[in-house]
Image (cartoon, rainbow, N blue to C red):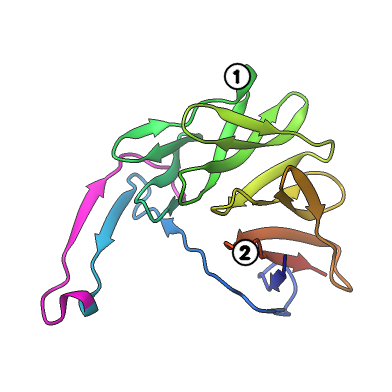
Amino acid sequence: MATFVLADPYFSDTLHDYALAGLRFAVPSLCPLTVAFALLVPASLLQASAVTYSLTDLGPADDGNQAVVNDRGQVLFSSGAVSFLYDGTRRPTPPAPGGTFFGGHDLNNLGQVVGGVFSPTGYAIGVYAGSSVQVIEDARNPNGYQINDAGQIAGDFIDSSYRSFLYSAESFTTISFLPGDFAMASRGINSAGDVLLVDRR
């Protein structure tokens, strides 16, 4: 696992980029009330022909919502504090076992959704994969923010450590601070399990 740390307006000014092997992308909502998904065909594939696309209205979405689309055309977004997965049909993700709240953050190319579960006992990771939400607990209150196609999860502990983690093979790896850091937050994970972070110093 490599770690990439970048600057944030409220974080440090230093960019530490080691060897980014892959990129992720997110599609923001196109307006406060509607998420739309457009499939674009590159002009290079059409040669001299015009670029064509189809536009699908996915319905209401939260103002400022950041949607995520995978290579299969599935879209994850939120509306009214509920996460929705669109795969031809708009449907809400189910609650975690026991009726606790589950909020989706990211979507991989297998259609797995990772997010946070909140219950009276604290935070946990939730992974939704087709029918139910699997809950991954730890005493440090983890929240999952990104997931790759291997099922590896990058996230943050919601406790006083201000640390991020990689969850892989049913085990948490706590990511160490760079010299001078006192807080960090995960921002991405690629197919190799490399984690992108912002740091604070």
Give the residue pinned by disc 2.
192
Q: Position of residue 141 (x, y in %)?
A: 78, 39
Q: What element carries label 1?
A: helix
Q: Residue at x 73, y 68 (%)?
A: 11
Q: Position of residue 159 (x, y in %)?
A: 83, 44
Residue nearest the observer in this picture, 65 or 114 = 114
Report which quarter residue 192 is drawn in: bottom right
- The residue positioned farthest toward the top in the image shown: 98
Which tag, 2 or 1, sits closer to the chain's start? Answer: 1
Q: Which residue is drawn at 39% across and 42% down?
A: 61
Give the residue pinned by disc 1.
99
Kind of residue sitting beneath label 2: Ala
Q: What kind of secondary structure does the magenta stretch mostly adopt? A: loop
| Residue 30 lies in the magenta-colored region | no
Kind of residue sitting beneath label 1: Gly
Q: Using a 10 Å C-alpha cutoff, classify the residue at mark 2 as few (fewer than 14 neighbours), some (14 to 19) or many (20 or more).
A: some
Q: Which residue is drawn at 30% across and 42% down?
A: 58
The quarter of the image holding the N terminus is bottom right
Point out the frontmost of discs 2 and 1: 2
Q: Position of residue 101 (x, y in %)?
A: 60, 28
Position of 155 with respect to 85 (left or right) is: right
Q: Where is residue 8 in the image (x, y as percent from the top left)?
A: 66, 69
Position of 17 with respect to 94 (left or right) is: right
Q: Using a 10 Å C-alpha cutoff, classify the residue at mark 1 as few (fewer than 14 neighbours), some (14 to 19) or many (20 or more).
A: few
Q: Give the range drawn in magenta.
A: 45-66
Above or below, 142 against 91 in this view is: below
Which circle marks residue 21 in the picture?
none
Q: Which residue is drawn at 38% across and 48% down?
A: 32
Above or below, 53 against 100 in this view is: below
The quarter of the image holding the C terminus is bottom right
